[in-house]
Image (spheres, coloured by chain):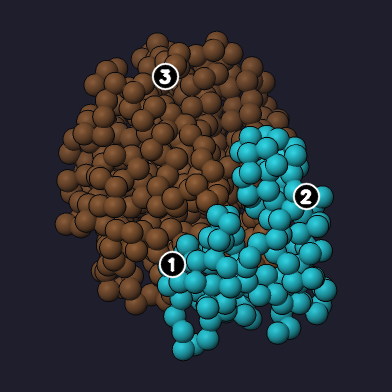
Chain colours: A brown, B cyan
Amino acid sequence: MTFNPKQCALAGIAETQVGRIPDRDSMQMYAELAVAAAQDAGLRKEEIDGLITGGTFLRNVFMHNAVVSEYLRMRPRYSSGLVMGGGVSWCHALGEACNAINAGVCNTVLVIAADPFFTVCARTAIDLMAEFFDPQYELPFGFVTPAMFAFAARRHMLQYGTSSEQLAQVAVSQRRNASLNPLAQFRKPIAIEDVLSSRMICSPLHLLDCSPISDGGGAFIVTSGDRARSLRKPPVYVLGYGEAHELEYTDPNRDITTSAAVRSGKDAYAAAGVGPEDIDFAEIYDCFTITMLVHLESLGFCPRGEGGAFVEDRRLEVDGDFPTNTHGGLLSHGHPGVPAGIFHIIEAVKQLRREVEPERQVRNTGTCLVHGNSALFRDAATAILSCHHSV
Amino acid sequence: MDVNRTVPFVDWDSAPFWEKLKEGKFMLMECSECHHVFFPARIICPECWSSALVWREASGNGVIYSFTTVEAGATAAFELLTPYTIALITLEEGCRVFGMLRHGAERTPAIGAQVRCDFEIDSNSGFVFPVFGLV
Ligand SMILES: [Zn+2]
């Protein structure tokens, strides 16, 4: 493959508090995030010649990227309105930005996503998300999002002996990480018992095995490595990127306890010239607790089937052996709909720059893996990031 | 059972499938070139891309690949029906299909358990839906 992401770097980031933001609509958040990300990078509006946006759950905005561009009075060389591709979107957008830069189409890409998902849609969120499902083979049968992940959790339990306590440990560790993050939605520590006694949503998944509904947004700026070195903040290089798309969960050839991440991860590691053993910490899209177990396995951090044992001993906590979702992840930092996976990238940048609160700064920040996934692990995008040009 | 279901959005591929359900038949497709049996219906074989296809009736027998009981967080149309159980079923012919699973309170489903397809009419819409029951 000719993809050479090492020429690109994350140069700026911005994020809102996640939780309830009653005084901002989607477009206002987009605008404020654009300004904040440009300030973080030390860039003027005229120096940003690429724009990627993610739409909003509020209403269907045709040509959303052009609407945002107009609001911000930008005239980019490159612009893309990512359709709502679920959790894979923001790692995918990072890859898209690198591709556009490496192809010489533009030099600096601003990526933004924001949604007041909780304030505006809390009551209707389930039905809104249901609109993405198949209108004849899924919806008329009472299909809901957590059901898909419950299918995977139950298979994982049968195939590998994974327990509800092990799933709960993911939620507990991420809550501990969120408890140290002032921008997270849920910060009160919880115990395994709290997860198991929370109400059952889709068996075997309890309420605390699932992501909440939140308001919030984030932005990041990608530019060439050369330009990034001349900007305000230390560059975070994209050392490797890989993407993969698998078959549907209803395909008889799919084992739903594995992810397309097996392939996206392999390509990302190969591009970066590293392996899972070289990764110091990870930020992995975690819509449900089972999603974490599957991805820790599929990305090679533990053998297949051993995700449950891997997360024990609080390994995923900021001061654990393998800090993961150090901001709290979707499970506790929050899930604002469209922007959900963007915070994993933003958190990776903050940790790599070593600019988070001292009590939650990860010790070893040489190399980080960020991963996005959608549609029950069908779509995957993985990136490997570092402040060092090579590992 | 009178159920307030979401009416399926029938497309050109699936119209015969929904029609045949009214006769108590769960139809799959078979490729005449590579003999792959698949569901849902398509205009080409997803395996070899041939367009030489025939409909084939499923035996109705299968095993549970996975299942869940939806206890909360259902869509508005299904809220009153909770708790209900939905499952991924591996049909005898090799296809994996998604469906409602009926089991009495006295019987607990399990992965690998044998199931059989039955048919239920929704009196509001006139659509017949496949439902699976433990054998
Ligand atoms: Zn064929």
Residue A182 spot, x, y in % from top left? 34, 52
| Residue A1 placement, left or right of B76 | left
Disc marking residue B112: 1
In the drawing, does residue A210 fall left or right of residue A28?
Answer: left
Mark 1 or mark 2, whichever is nearer to me: 1
Disc 2 to disc 3, how far (Cα)? 42 Å
Quadrant containing the N terminus of chain B is bottom right
* Residue B52, horizontal then vertical, whole percent: 75, 39
The local secondary structure at tag 1 comes to loop
Residue type (three-letter) at the residue carrying disc 3: Pro
**Label at residue A42:** none
Three-letter residue code for mark 1: Gly
For label 1, the crowd category at 10 Å Cα-Cα, with few meaning under 14, some 14 to 19 and many 20 or more, is: few
Residue at the (34%, 63%) spot, across then down: A157
Which residue is painted at 61% across and 57% down in the image?
A129
Q: Nearer the viewer, mark 2 or mark 3?
A: 2
Per the model, the C-alpha gap separating discs 1 and 2 is 30 Å
SS at mark 3 in the image: helix
Return the residue at label 3.
A5
Residue A66 found in image quarter:
top right
To which chain does the residue with label 2 belong? Answer: B
Asked if both marks, 2 and 3, belong to the same chain, the answer given is no
Residue B126 occupies quadrant: bottom right
**Chain letter, disc 1 residue:** B
Distance, label 1 to label 3, CA atoms, is 45 Å
Q: As shown in the figure, which amino acid type bears the numbered disc 2?
A: Asp
The x and y percentages for residue A115 are 58, 49
Q: Could you tell whether A227 is left or right of B76 in the image?
A: left
The residue at which mark 2 appears reads as B13
Q: Is disc 1 in the same subunit as disc 3?
A: no
Write down the chain letter for disc 3.
A
